[in-house]
Image: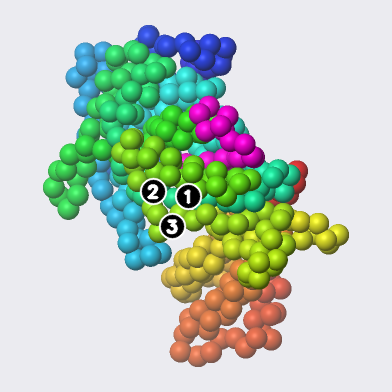
Amino acid sequence: METKLARISELSAENPNMVFNSIGHLINEELLKECHADMDGKKAVGIDGVTKEAYGRNLDANLENLVGRLKSKSYRPKPAKRIEIPKDNGKTRPLNIYCYEDKIIQEAVRRLLEAVFEPCFYDEMMGFRPHRGCHDAVKRLGRMIEDDDTNWILDADIKGFFDHLNHEWIIKFVESRISDPNVIRLIRRLLKSGIIKDYYFESTEEGSGQGAVCSPILANIYMHYVLVWWFKEKIQPLMKGFSGLVVYADDFVVCFQYKSEAERFYELLKARMKTFGLDMEESKTRLIEFGKHADDDRRGRGDKKPETFTFLGFTHYCSKSRKGNFRVKRKTSRKKYAKKCRELNITIRDMRNWRLQPIFDTVNQILVGYYHYYGITDNFHAIASMERKVERMLFYWLNRRSNKRSYIWSGFSMLLKQYPIVRPKIYVNVYS
């Protein structure tokens, strides 16, 4: 099956205008069995309560039945269970939990869409793509700021992106490369499957649920046509100065040489987004002076030092290298740092009565993941601060394992020699 999907990718890359009219038959028992094997069995279960293990006990019969329903067009995805995840600003983010069988179908659809559309995507798009990630987006942005004539940054935010994707536009975008009615029907049914919230059914007339396996690729297709293709093919050719774009899911930054062109682009962008059912979050969207000349230009006008902006959890700021050359540097954003501290404090509090080895193993596992993401060039001070913060949390909560004080700092330092906390390390060189 991988060979067939790879061949579709080759055809898509070789023929950018090719429309695939018969690929729905690839969603067969072979592909679905591969999807089942790759599925995470530890995820929360949907409204039917079926787990991966339970579905796999009679896998062949279940998949045969599922394929039969696909062929007879009688397959109907079940509604997703809607839960609300708290956000830092006091609001919540909706998360949909789908039934296991529907996740398998979503994964099969994701693989088909990725095979067709991945070769069409521009390099400006980094999120949810093979062999690309957050650090690649940060590196690309850094090169545009340091090596090109970037003087202005548009730090943009789309209001409720995943919740407001227009279903008809999704279908039109998919149909630009896939005309197979079986695939289109399946995508439409997945989008319209509805949710169960507070024990009541709600229809889904817009949006692609966060939590759906195929939502990331659908979001990328949407952003490709609404933003990236438009910017590359229609906007950039009209620019007199430099302009560049980096996109990660619904988060994007646009660089400009001239302020007038940045302002004009933003007005066009707002109109473009409205056409496709989206709105810019204007309170979170900013145009700031930023780049190799920003500090001197602002000082010449008597202004303060250049503003900063946050992208993918990093605060970007203007600085200089040891040789005095311009450098854009990054540090963990205050918001993300504070959020991680709160999460770790709760985790350590809840583990305080465990045996010491599992406590330190868990903390170290969390810290290694944190260092792998935030351990990038120029950010050592911030990740080292997290290590010191965790030490103080451990000291505080281990002293509350009983009514008696367990440790003083000298004794706790001896304990850390026996159960060392993993040291911070720079894992990502943004100039590599």
Tag 2: amino acid:
Met
Specify start and end residues of the magenta stretch as a single range. Answer: 233-250
Q: Do the residues labelled 1 and 2 touch (CB within 8 Å)?
A: yes
Q: In this view, does 83 lie to the left or right of 123?
A: left
- For the residue labelled by badge 1, is the local secondary structure a helix, a strand or a loop? strand
Residue 310 shows up from this direction: yes
CB atoms of marks 2 and 3 within 8 Å: no
Residue 247 belongs to the span the image colors magenta? yes
| Distance from the alpha carbon under mark 2 to that under mark 3 | 9 Å
Q: Which circle marks residue 284 in the picture?
A: 3
- The one nearer the camera, 276 or 171, is 276
* Position of residue 430 in the picture relative to residue 107 (left or right): right
Residue 327, quarter of the rendered image: bottom right
List x then y, in percent, for residue 160.
34, 48
Residue 359: name its quadrant.
Answer: bottom right
Q: How many angstroms separate mark 1 from mark 2 (CA)?
A: 8 Å
Indicate which disc residue 156 carries. 1
Does residue 201 appear to the left or right of 149 in the view shown? left
Within 10 angstroms of label 1, few (less than 14), some, or many (20 or more) residues?
many
Question: In screen coordinates, is 134 left or right of 167?
Answer: right
Q: Which residue is drawn at 49% across and 42% down?
A: 265
